[in-house]
Image: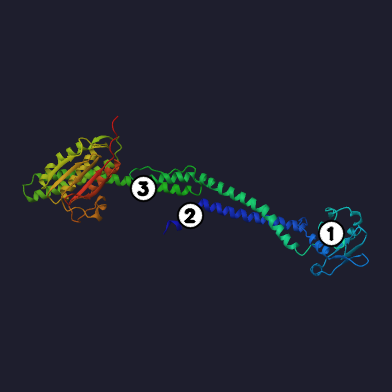
Amino acid sequence: MSESADHYCLRSQLSWRLVALQALLLAMLIVCLISALCATGFLIVPRDEDHVISIVQSAIARDGQGNLVLRPTAELKQLRENTPDLWFQVRDRQGHSLSEGAVPPEFAGIGDALDQISQARLGWQMFEDDPRKPPARLKRVNSDAGPVQVLTATQGPTSSVKTALATTLAFLAVALPGLLLMACATFIATPMVVKRAFAGLDTAADQARRIDFRQRGSRLSADHLPLEVAPLVTAVNDALTRLDDGYSRHQRFVADAAHELRTPIAILNTRLESLPAGPEKTRLLEDSARLATLAEQLLDIQRFDQCRNPFGRVDLVAVARTVAADLAPLAIAGGYELSLDSAADHAETLGDRAALERALTNLVQNAIQHGGRRGTITIHVGSGATVDVTDEGDGIPQHERTRIFDPFYRLAPLDRGAGLGLNMVREIARLHGGHVSVLDGPKGGACFRLTLPPAPFAS
């Protein structure tokens, strides 16, 4: 299951959904406002009386007696067909006039009084008369009959298009700036609000990433969390508490078992020493020694895992000399030569000397046990706080090199080792901020490299 299919950005979804909701509410508000204005008659839409005046202007002419007449133009014919409520009145300054349609009586006799006016719009008193009555348009134009005055209140055939266009423009003029303003505010404000609301969750996530299973008592902060997320953090803390309790019980069990084993193993060794010499006694003593080593390794794991003492400067060359001196008899008895060399007189790191000695001891013991009982086991201390333990055995297959550090894992199922030595080496290396790795030896064997942080130069 891919992460992209499971995860989504809450901030982005909130922003887009809020913008969509705001756009919908704004559109509904504009529609309701326009509907209310249309229902009450207060919506003033652009009119197109000039179109009617232009058609009449083109059709006006004079007859032989000088009277005003209308020529039967195609535009005038179409206007009459498309406009059932057509009316207009035409006058010149000589007193000639003509009209068509039902001229409202309010406008029928006002032409003489407006001879000096070139154009005007004649409206109604909104609060005393019907506001839905259209105002009249008066305009003086030049025609084939000379200057004439045309008065009409009829809209032309393009008025519906202009009305729709005007309504659309009015909607955009009001809605679009408001929507853009709200969208900008949403995309700026929403991430800020969400980020502030989830600040506690980011802190808890950062704390969760830093949890180390070797450090008990780690908990996620429940401060400044949304109510919807707080139960999840509480459940995680409860789970961490249960894990700590279980790990502590496991540690106590292992430590108690190791302590309890030491006494019967010591008694067993004492009784074995009293047996007559022979092959059986030798094998029994080896088995007893492995039991003692296993008990000591279990105790070492618990002790080093709980180590909280301040680290000091440790000379790895001195540690290597101590380990080589202690294990030289065991290596020689196993059929090996033991060699020690170093790139410098001193190679210091910060750590626990006893733990580092135990780690190096386990590496050398591992080489003695799996080196094929031939060749030379070499301990090499590098100048960069590294220690290599190399044997001339069969080596370790590439696919096994990460698994051999797991507890109780053995390359051969019938191997007489306990499978804890290399795991303890890895844990000690981690405790010191380093790591252990497996390389190919120069003569075909295995090379275990313990890499530690170099100690800072003393001031």
Which is nearer the eye, 244 or 110? 110
Image mark for residue 8: 2
Q: Which residue is mark 3?
A: 243
At label 2, counting other C-alpha atoms closer than 10 Å, the crowd grade (few under 14, some 14-19, many 20 or more) is: few
Comparing marks 3 and 1, which lies closer to the viewer? Answer: 1
- The disc labelled 1 sits on which kind of residue? Asn
At label 3, counting other C-alpha atoms closer than 10 Å, the crowd grade (few under 14, some 14-19, many 20 or more) is: some
Comparing marks 3 and 2, which lies closer to the viewer? Answer: 2
Horizontal side, residue 91 vs residue 399: left or right: right
Question: Which of the two discs, 3 and 1, labels the residue nearer the N terminus?
Answer: 1
Quarter of the picture holding the N terminus: bottom left
Spot occupied by residue 27 in the image (x, y as percentages of width and height): 65, 56
- The disc labelled 3 sits on which kind of residue? Leu
Q: Is residue 353 above or below residue 265?
A: above
Question: Which of the two discs, 2 and 1, labels the residue nearer the N terminus?
Answer: 2
Q: Which residue is mark 1?
A: 142
Q: Is residue 134 above or below residue 368?
A: below
Quarter of the picture holding the C terminus: top left
Q: SS class of the residue under badge 2?
A: loop
Q: CA distance from mark 3 to mark 2?
A: 30 Å
Write down the quadrant of residue 424 in the picture.
Answer: top left
